[in-house]
Image: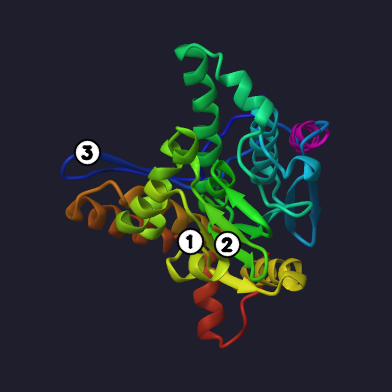
């Protein structure tokens, strides 16, 4: 039997609600063998829509339907969710790259899938929509940094997939971004929650209402993309950024930064400051913080594992 217990955690009474702070660490009551067995059980899943690979502490999750422009359906959503779970649980993985095969990053929903859901009743549509919501939230709240490499079209749900990643690198010549849902009578409902956080309400309104497609340079200008590089250099740029994060930054700290950003967005100013102060205090007690301070005082480079 395996129990997930935080190494330490405290509940702080905020002015308007209770805020829980937990580190995503747990003690394995069982043997190391069982932990390895669990991880291997997930890794051994047979993916049909994606590819999963780990090298040099970087996990690569690749959309693999180039003949369909990596359009997604319920199967791809399920496989992506499983893959991100594997990456989160694997202690050897320190950063995640999400990329795609072929000419497109993702054109959004598969045509056959759209025909299928058009016949769903409300309960079926709600369940299906909930699965996509959970995937987006899973990527957004992933404790490890997620880097999207976008070449070609990232449209509708495909654009949403890039939006929920921490960092987005786009191919200058080919990358195109757009929330085109309104042009087929649909809306970018789920991703709007994340898009507003990323680019602000004004730009989110424009993108969602016009349904227009923008270039990589324009996407960078509005904050949707972090870095634009020549298409031939996109894989190299992704690997370089991932290695930079792994080498120069504490994995624990990056996870806590992501948690901080996620949680304070819905808080009042006073509650956000309370939460931030408490998290600051707890972070000082982590092994990574102690290690970093010790190395700083000794004027030695920190070697993050």
Q: Which quadrant holds the C terminus?
A: bottom right
Residue 60 location in percent, x, y?
A: 74, 53
Q: Earlier in the sequence, mark 3 or mark 1?
A: 3
Q: Is residue 55 magenta?
A: no
184 displayed left or right of 261: right
Q: Which residue is mark 2?
A: 168
Q: Is residue 77 above or below residue 197?
A: above
Which color scheme does this rendered protein use?
A: rainbow
Q: Quick one: SS at disc 3? A: loop
**Magenta stretch secondary structure, dominant:** helix
Mark 3 or 1, which is nearer the eye?
Answer: 1
Badge 3: few (under 14), some or many (20 or more) residues near its Cα, within 10 Å? few
> What label sits on residue 224 in the rendered view?
1
Q: Which quadrant holds the N terminus?
A: top right
Q: Which residue is mark 3?
A: 17
2 displayed left or right of 182: right
Q: Quick one: SS at disc 1? A: loop
Q: Is 7 in front, or is 50?
A: 50
Q: Earlier in the sequence, mark 3 or mark 2?
A: 3
The residue sitting at the bottom extreme is 299
**What residue range appears in magenta?**
32-44
């Amino acid at each position: 039997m395996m129990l997930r217990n935080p190494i330490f955690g405290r509940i702080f009474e905020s002015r308007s609600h209770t805020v829980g702070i937990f580190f995503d660490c747990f003690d394995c009551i069982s043997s190391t063998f069982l932990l390895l067995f669990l991880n291997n059980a997930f890794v051994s899943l047979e993916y049909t829509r994606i590819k999963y690979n780990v090298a040099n502490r970087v996990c690569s999750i690749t959309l693999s339907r180039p003949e369909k422009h990596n359009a997604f359906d319920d199967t791809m959503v399920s496989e992506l969710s499983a893959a991100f779970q594997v990456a989160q649980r694997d202690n050897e993985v320190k950063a995640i790259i999400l990329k795609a095969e072929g000419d497109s990053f993702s054109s959004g929903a598969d045509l056959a899938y759209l025909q299928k859901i058009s016949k769903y009743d409300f309960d079926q549509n709600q369940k299906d929509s909930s699965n996509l919501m959970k995937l987006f939230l899973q990527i957004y709240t992933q404790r490890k940094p997620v880097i999207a490499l976008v070449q070609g079209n990232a449209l509708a749900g495909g654009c949403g997939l890039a939006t929920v990643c921490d960092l987005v690198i786009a191919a200058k010549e080919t990358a195109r971004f757009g929330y085109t849902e309104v042009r087929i009578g649909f809306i970018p409902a789920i991703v709007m929650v994340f898009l507003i956080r990323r680019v602000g309400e004004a730009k989110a309104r424009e993108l969602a209402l016009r349904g227009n497609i923008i270039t990589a340079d324009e996407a960078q200008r509005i904050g949707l993309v972090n870095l634009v590089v020549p298409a031939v250099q996109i894989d190299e740029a992704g690997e370089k950024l991932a290695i930079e994060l792994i080498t120069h930054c504490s994995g624990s700290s990056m996870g806590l930064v992501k948690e901080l950003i996620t949680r304070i967005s819905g808080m009042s100013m006073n509650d956000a400051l309370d939460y931030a102060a408490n998290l600051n205090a707890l972070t000082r007690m982590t092994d990574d913080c102690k290690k970093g301070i010790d190395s700083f005082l000794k004027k030695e480079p920190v070697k993050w594992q």
